Image (tube, grey):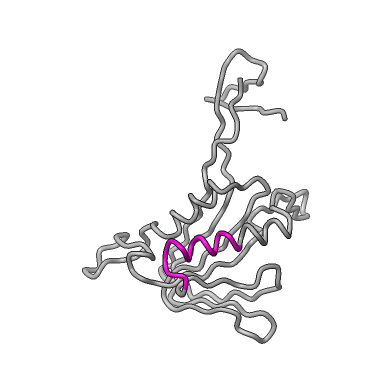
Amino acid sequence: MLYLVTVSGSRFHPSSNFRHTISVLIMRAVLQRVHQASVTVGDEVVSSIGRGLCVLVGIHKDDTQADMDYMVRKVLNTRLFDDADGKRWKLSVKDSGLEILCVSQFTLYCVLKGNKPDYHQAMGGDAAKQFYHNFITQLGQQYKSNLVKDGAFGAMMQVHIQNDGPVTINLESPTTKADIP
């Protein structure tokens, strides 16, 4: 694998006499604070929540358990809600006892090749389905499973979101992937 690292505007090749650890941003999620959200497949409502978070989850082909652990921690603990006194950014979804609706979103790994979208950075179907299921399970284990809902993995879904704020936060998991000599 060839790495080209840019540091302070200078380009270094791995064969240079320096050592650098690169941190690759892997798993992605878009957190949206919502008044309500739902997922519909065809004419059927698959999941719905009231106040809480709608989380669009992108899984990279190289994601690991460490990426999942980081993302679960951030989804549950990022302070996006007001406290009882109306002070902003004081409470997390977990602190507030609110609901979470997760939607698998491989398109978060779109790379445009000209005008055509390419998704080669997203994890493949079967592996992504298992990883996503594990992510949902871990969220439920660290929170309240009855407050964690999800869409229909791999289905053509309509996601209805009534954004609150609007507040939309992009998250990426930092995972050290390589030491470059």
Q: Measuring 45% from the left and 73% from the top, which residue is drawn there?
A: 147
Name the spot of residue 53 as percent of width and height, x first: 46, 68
In the displayed structure, does residue 100 sit left or right of residue 56? left
Name the spot of residue 10 as percent of width and height, x first: 58, 22
Q: Residue furthest front?
A: 141
Up/down of 49 relative to 141, above or below: below
In the displayed structure, does residue 128 sit left or right of residue 19? right
In the displayed structure, does residue 91 sit left or right of residue 34? left
Quick one: 80 or 48, which is closer to the camera? 48
Quarter of image, res 136: bottom right
Up/down of 2 relative to 60, above or below: above
Residue 58 falls inside the magenta stretch: no
Quick one: 143 or 76, which is closer to the camera? 143
Up/down of 74 relative to 54, above or below: above
Quick one: 159 or 93, which is closer to the camera? 93
Residue 143 falls inside the magenta stretch: yes
Name the spot of residue 21 as percent of width and height, x first: 55, 28
Q: Measuring 67% from the left and 16% from the top, which residue is drawn there?
A: 15
Judged by its main secondary structure, the magenta piece is helix
Residue interval drawn in magenta: 133-145
The quadrant the C terminus occupies is top right
Quarter of image, res 88: bottom left
Q: Measuring 48% from the left and 62% from the top, which residue is drawn there?
A: 139
The quadrant the N terminus occupies is top right
Q: Residue furthest top?
A: 17
